Image: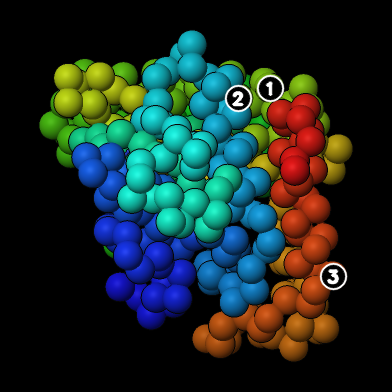
Amino acid sequence: MNRRYSERVITGLNHLASGKIRDLYAVGDDLLLVASDKISAFDYVLESEIPDKGRILTQLSMWWFRQLADLVPNHVISADVEQFPAELQPYKEELRGRSMLCRKLSMVQVECVARGYLTGSGLAEYERTRTANGVPLPPGLVDGSRLDRPIFTPAMKAEVGQHDENVSFEDMAERIGDPELAAQLKDLTLAVYSRAREIAEERGIILADTKFEFGRLRGGTLVLADEVLTPDSSRFWPADEWKPGRTQSSFDKQYVRDWLSSPASGWDRKSDTPPPVLPEEVVQATRARYVEAYERLTGAKFD
Ligand SMILES: CCOC(=O)Cn1cc(-c2ncnc(N)c2C#N)cn1
């Protein structure tokens, strides 16, 4: 396990894995997904933490799971620490609001990405080949262009720290060895993204793209796993700043990006050195953006 995570992992629980931001534990036959307050930028996990980020994004995920329940079942048993098993009760204050007790699934090893706008790795391929994951796109698209119809651009999971490998739908179907499941993943990914994009745009937030993970329950039912539709699993853009043809402003990370890119940070992004600690005002402004995203989307106050 990477040294960075050692101080984050709750000793005394059965730790299974750590991603950049979240940790996974085994709890009996179930799993516990815990979101930290870490934030990543420019492919680094920053030393600075954003207070409450884990709680805000977990509560946002739970809100989305409820909004989408008619479209697709999900893996969550509970996000209420008072309902967690006895073995977790000694840690309940540390876990409160930032953890989801989930059913253990047989995970589908595909990152199910939906794109409603062209940017990032999708744009890079388009600029080379006028396609996205092998699917031809119209000419004249630029960074941030809204696509007429959302596209499914699956990726095969990469090793920790590497970028996922974008693959064509046919290649993904071949690699999971189940064309019917591949079609189901595509349909579900696009249906859930389309619903979420509509909800977000009504609230002034562009959901440019998102990454879902699916898994199967013992009986074979396909359910939505992981976190969903958070600024960590998706690109959130403020709709009133959208301007195709340039890098879009990130709803949640722009303050961090701007400060790290400014002379004030003294950091050279092209160097191999990790980014410096963030000034308190950048931390607090970023926290406020996560709270704003949560409150605008859910209509509820974050407390
Ligand atoms: C540590 C952060 O990385 C992840 O959580 C990714 N991941 C999820 C699983 C998983 N495995 C079985 N059942 C589930 N319900 C899930 C979920 N979610 C494994 N890795």
Mark sitting earlier along the chain (2/3)? 2
Q: Quadrant of residue 229?
A: top right
Q: Residue at x 84, y 70 (%)?
A: 281
Gap between marks 1 and 2 measured at Cα? 5 Å
Residue type, numbered disc 1: Ile
Observer able to see residue 161: no
Q: Which residue is mark 3?
A: 281
Q: Which residue is labeled 2 in the image?
A: 196
Q: Is residue 270 left or right of residue 247?
A: left
Q: Quadrant of the N terminus?
A: bottom left
The amino acid marked with disc number 2 is Ala
Q: Kindly identify which numbered label has been placed on residue 199.
A: 1
Structure colour scheme:
rainbow
Q: Secondary structure at mark 3?
A: helix
Is the C-beta separation of discs 1 and 2 under 8 Å?
A: yes
In this rendering, which labeled residue sits more in front, label 2 or label 3? Answer: 3
